[in-house]
Amino acid sequence: MDDTHVETEEELKARLTPEQYHVLREKGTEVPYTGELNNEKRKGTYYSVGCDQPVFRSEQKYDSKTGWPSFWDPIKPDALVLQEDYELGTKRIEVLDTCGGHLGHVFDDGPEPSGKRYCMNSLALRFIPDKEQ
């Protein structure tokens, strides 16, 4: 985790929307097929809204037909923090940004080359399209 600048809960509440705060800090989940980034098709970079750090590239995104933006790999190996999650009574792997914000979960049913499905909440991400040349 990145401890260089940790925002207080009050700072986060002031900066994020209530929905973003719920997902990032209270481990909420948006309703499937409602996230604005689920159908995003442009080339660009996805940033965590909690840390404002790049976490995925559009080339790593695919349509998992689950209703959430899905990626087969992060932008770089240390862009995310993975931890075991037993909240639903079964083992899952939670995906956090480097500031400790909940982004979603990763599953072993994704496409090659990784075989992973990083199933993310749109509310936890910000998309910046590549500049057109």
Image (cartoon, rainbow, N blue to C red):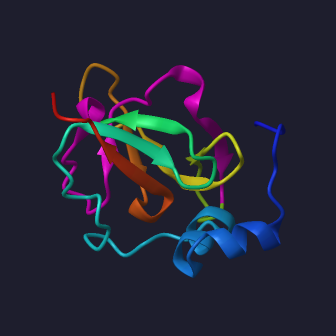
Rendering quarter of residue 66: bottom left
- Residue at (50, 59) in percent of width and height: 124
Image coordinates of residue 11 in percent, x first then y, are 77, 68
**Outermost residue to the front:** 133
Question: Which residue is at the front of the view, 117 or 53?
Answer: 53
Lateral position of residue 38 relative to residue 127, left or right: left
Magenta stretch contains residue 59: yes
- Residue at (65, 69) in percent of width and height: 15
Quadrant including the N terminus: top right
Magenta stretch contains residue 9: no
Lateral position of residue 16 relative to residue 131, left or right: right
- Residue at (70, 74) in percent of width and height: 13
- Residue at (49, 36) in percent of width and height: 54
Question: Which residue is at the front of the view, 80 or 46?
Answer: 46
Image coordinates of residue 41 in percent, x first then y, are 16, 47
Q: Which residues are magenta?
A: 58-86
Q: Is residue 91 above or below residue 23?
A: above
Quadrant including the C terminus: top left
Rendering quarter of residue 42: top left
Q: Is residue 46 above or below residue 121?
A: above
